[in-house]
C-alpha cells in the first residue's frame, strides 16, 4: 500500500539535518523498493497559495496556515500496512527536529 510521509519542521531546525543524511536514507529505501518518490522543498518564503472562489482566482504569498513548522518535503513509500509505514517514518532524519505525518494514499476512482 502507498503512504505519503510529510516532513514538517521549522526551517532553522531543519538546517541541522544534512542533505547527505537524507540522501542516504532515501537510498536505503530505494534498495528495498520502498521509495516511490521523495523530494525536499524550497524554503516556505518561495511558496504561493492559490484559491478559486466563485470563479475568481486569488494568489497569496506563502502558505496559508500560520505555524512554526512548515512542510519541508515528502517521501512516497510502499509499505505492507500503517505499522510498517510508521516504522519507516521514524527513520526519516528530519523526524529528530520536526514531525512526520503519515497518511495512506487514496486512489482516485473514475465514475
Image (cartoon, rainbow, N blue to C red):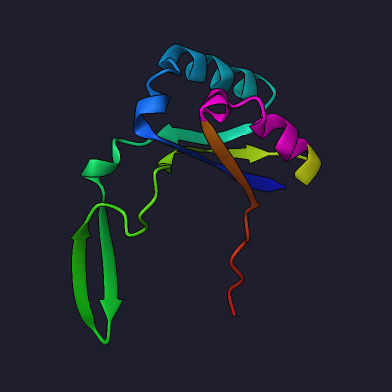
Residue stretch rendered in magenta on the structure: 84-97
Q: Is residue 26 magenta?
A: no
Magenta span main SS:
helix
Q: Give percent across and percent down for residue 47.
A: 26, 48
53 relative to 111 in the view: left or right: left
Above-or-below relation of 10 to 66 = above
Above-or-below relation of 51 to 101 = below
Residue at 62% x, 54% y is 105
Q: Give percent across and percent down for residue 27.
A: 56, 18
Q: Give percent across and percent down for residue 49.
A: 27, 59
Above-or-below relation of 53 to 9 = below
Q: Quadrant of residue 10?
A: top left
Q: Give percent across and percent down for residue 30.
A: 60, 23
What quarter of the picture does the C terminus occupy?
A: bottom right
Q: Nearer the viewer, residue 24 or 86?
A: 86
Q: Nearer the viewer, residue 42 or 12?
A: 12
Residue at 20% x, 81% y is 56
Above-or-below relation of 25 to 47 = above
31 relative to 15 in the view: left or right: right
Q: Quadrant of residue 73?
A: top left
Residue at 80% x, 41% y is 83
Residue at 28% x, 76% y is 52
Q: Nearer the viewer, residue 103 or 96?
A: 96
Amino acid at each position: 500500500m502507498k503512504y505519503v510521509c510529510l516532513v514538517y519542521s521549522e526551517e532553522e531546525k531543519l538546517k541541522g539535518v544534512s542533505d547527505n543524511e537524507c540522501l542516504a536514507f532515501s537510498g536505503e529505501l530505494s534498495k528495498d523498493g520502498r521509495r516511490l518518490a521523495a523530494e525536499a522543498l524550497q524554503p516556505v518564503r518561495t511558496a504561493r497559495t492559490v484559491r478559486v472562489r466563485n470563479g475568481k482566482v486569488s494568489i497569496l504569498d506563502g502558505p496559508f496556515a500560520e505555524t512554526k513548522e512548515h512542510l519541508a518535503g515528502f517521501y512516497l513509500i510502499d509499505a505492507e500496512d500503517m505499522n510498517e509505514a510508521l516504522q519507516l517514518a521514524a527513520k526519516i532524519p528530519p523526524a529528530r527536529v520536526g514531525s512526520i505525518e503519515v497518511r495512506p494514499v487514496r486512489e482516485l476512482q473514475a465514475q
